[in-house]
Amino acid sequence: MISNAISRCAIEIKKNRDRSWIIGYSGGKDSTAALKVFLAASRESGCEDDCITVIYCDTGVENPELDFFAKRTLEGMQRELPVIFPNLRIEILKAPLKEGFFARVVGRGYAPPTNRFRWCTKGLRVLPVQRFIKASPGDAAVVLGLRYGESRQRDRSLAKGGGEEAIWQVQREGAQRDLLLPVLDFNLEMVWAAAQLIDLPSSIDSIALEELYRGATEECPMVKSPLAPPCASGRFGCWTCTVVRRDKSTENMVKNGKAWLQPYLDFRDWLQLFRAQASFRWPVRRNGAVGLGPFTVEGRKIIFKEIQLLEEAVGRELLSHAEIALIKDLWRQDAEPEERLRLRGK
């Protein structure tokens, strides 16, 4: 089945020799499988000289273990792959400083994301990628590790773009783009088989990837007997994510020996509770509607202090000097409107 997927993908690559390719890589199993299938197909098609860009979107708040793994892997791929694919490059994308997670929460006072106000995905992931694609010259196609069976919402989204048999899809999210989905019809076992058995890039440590998932989700990635119980479908999130009630992946990592992640988990849990404290929120939203609005400047300063304590606990800079300067400037901008709200409430 994997060899069939490679051949099917190779046919599409050969048909589209005039295109450049943008491959989304997150460090996770699905993007790893898609990358490996695509590169194997590129070699099979004889199109190794095509323009290929591997992109990684750095939100600044990725699960630290996955982020370290992905960036270490990208460094290895940067050394390995251009020897085989002369027109391949690697790009790490990031939202502009003013649109980052901390600029929004600590600077502007955004409430941390919820299911009803999930502002993070678009701002930190979707827009940086869309901007990169829009700026790419020529007719670029995007290669992603999307597949059926991950979630009902994902299945509905994929169904809008084409049938289950099509590995080409067109989706409109701000700008129309063609998507090549090499692992669209893969199940979990096939994803892991592709991630582990395809040898290129060799700089992807499949054993380390397996251990990462096993520690975070207790997922069993090895190819199994059809009679064995199904494996879990693990997924990583940002260490600041308050959309979910509990960050189970980080909880599992801590339980399985990654005790250094506990301060990140403690901060996330604290932030989730702090979000609900009305005394540290404006009584109106920025559009003037009545209801819990942004954090007060005092509330933002409390969050800022907690981040500084977290930096001390983990021995890692989380806020750059430029971010701190921007945050303090945003506090100054909100001081006057906040004072007007206070006087109006008397």
Image (cartoon, grey):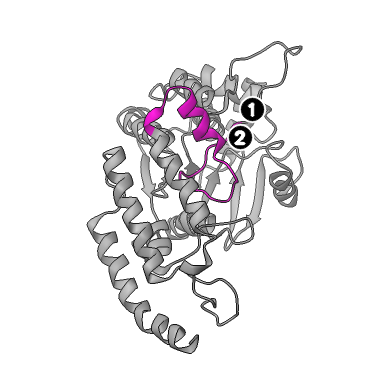
Magenta stretch holds residue 248: yes
Residue under the image location 49 percent in, 34 percent down: 250
**Can see residue 122?**
yes
Residue under the image location 57 percent in, 62 percent down: 175
Give residue 43's position: percent from left, percent from top: 48, 27
Q: Tell me where the magenta segment starts and ends, as one range.
A: 234-260
Q: Which residue is mark 2?
A: 182
Considering the whole magenta stretch, tell me its main secondary structure. loop
Task: Give SS at disc 1.
Answer: helix
Q: Quadrant of the N terminus?
A: top right
Give residue 107's position: percent from left, percent from top: 37, 66
Give residue 83's position: percent from left, percent from top: 32, 28
Residue under the image location 25 percent in, 65 percent down: 325
| 117 to 221, vertically: above or below | below
| 137 to 285, vertically: above or below | above
Q: Which residue is mark 1?
A: 5
Magenta stretch holds residue 242: yes
Q: Nearer the viewer, residue 209 or 10?
A: 209
The residue carrying pointer 1 sits among few (fewer than 14), some (14 to 19) or many (20 or more) residues within 10 Å by Cα, namely: many
Would residue 133 be found to the left or right of residue 114 on screen?
Answer: left
The residue carrying pointer 2 sits among few (fewer than 14), some (14 to 19) or many (20 or more) residues within 10 Å by Cα, namely: many
Whether pointer 2 and pointer 1 mark residues with C-beta atoms closer than 8 Å, the reply is: yes
Q: Nearer the viewer, residue 245 or 225?
A: 245
Residue under the image location 67 percent in, 39 percent down: 167
Q: Earlier in the sequence, mark 2 or mark 1?
A: 1
Choose top left, top right, bottom left or bottom right for residue 200: top left
Residue 175: numbered disc: none
Q: Nearer the viewer, residue 45 or 232?
A: 232
Q: Amino acid at mark 1?
A: Ala
